[in-house]
Image: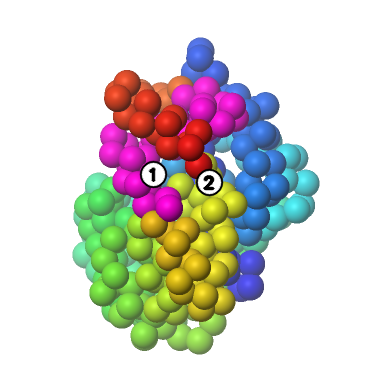
Amino acid sequence: MQSLIGTGVALVTPFKKDFSVDTEALSRIVNFQIDNGIDYLVVLGTTAENATLSQDEKEVVINTVIEANNSRLPLVLGVGGNNTHEVVNELKTRDLSKFVAVLSVSPYYNKPTQEGIYRHFEAIANVSPLPIILYNVPGRTSSNMLPSTVIRLANDFKNIVAIKEAAGDIVQAMKLIQNKPDGFHVISGDDMITLPMVLAGGSGVISVIGEGFPRQFSDMVRLGLQRKVDEAYKLHYLLAESIDMIFEQGNPAGIKEVHKTLGLSENTVRLPLVNVEENLAKRLSDFTKKL
């Protein structure tokens, strides 16, 4: 899928100070991405705090992004969970007509075996009307989807077309890139090793920092895909400090501080998340203004 090459961003859900969904801010954020070179948008991923959104609020987020985007960029929808039956039912019943793919996280908390992970995605692949991007993020799920499982799924199901690989392990990413079938995309889910993954043969990134600094980060990925290594690494090192900072006290609290400094939205997060501490907020604000 050509639409999965380059820089995608995992959109936050901005909240007003009363914790309600801020649709005006979400529209501003969508336009900010489009105006600054992002290639596609991911709706209701982990960064969206979707675990704290009601079903009605999720519909509001989806409809707001679709309207603000106005068919300008490809859209990917997060549809995942640790209840296989529930994920399958959502894929059967949700209107997915405005999306090009779904992003589905490996089951969290249950800690399934590799065979359990395989069968979870087998059930999803058998019903999904859209191409599927697997999502491996062991830091959140407490289980690592091994390259052998990913390659097995990619070979067995033609509608499993990519993986967002966020183990933070460049060796594991390289094994995926080396052994993947033709046309399967290995997408970075870790901003700090995005450029090395791209240069090793990856297709790009689904990013968090790219949502704060879309022009610089998407330019870095573009240069990496063009094999303009020195120019790409200049942008990587320009942004590296900010990547560390936005994850220092949790995602998306860090990136929401950047958005506040940029005037895009409030920095409000919902419990159990809390705002970053004052010292980090100042460092993020200073970095953003300087950049």
Residue 7, given in percent of the width and then of the height, sits at 55, 60
Q: Is residue 148 visible?
A: yes
Looking at the rendered structure, the kind of residue marked 2 is Phe
The secondary structure that dominates the magenta segment is helix
Task: Tell whether 173 sits left or right of 220.
Answer: left
Task: Tell whether 24 sits left or right of 177.
Answer: right
Which residue is labeled 2 in the image?
213
Quarter assignment of residue 281: top left
Task: Tell whether 31 sits left or right of 245.
Answer: right
Instruction: Quarter of the image for the N terminus: give it.
Output: bottom right
Which residue is labeled 1 in the image?
242
Q: Which residues are magenta?
A: 238-267
- In the displayed structure, 75 sits above or below 287; it is below
Using the image as rendered, state which of residue 171 and residue 284 is in the foreground: 284
Looking at the rendered structure, the kind of residue marked 1 is Ser
Classed neighbour count for the residue bearing mark 2: other residues with Cα under 10 Å, few (<14), some (14–19), many (≥20): many
SS under mark 2: loop
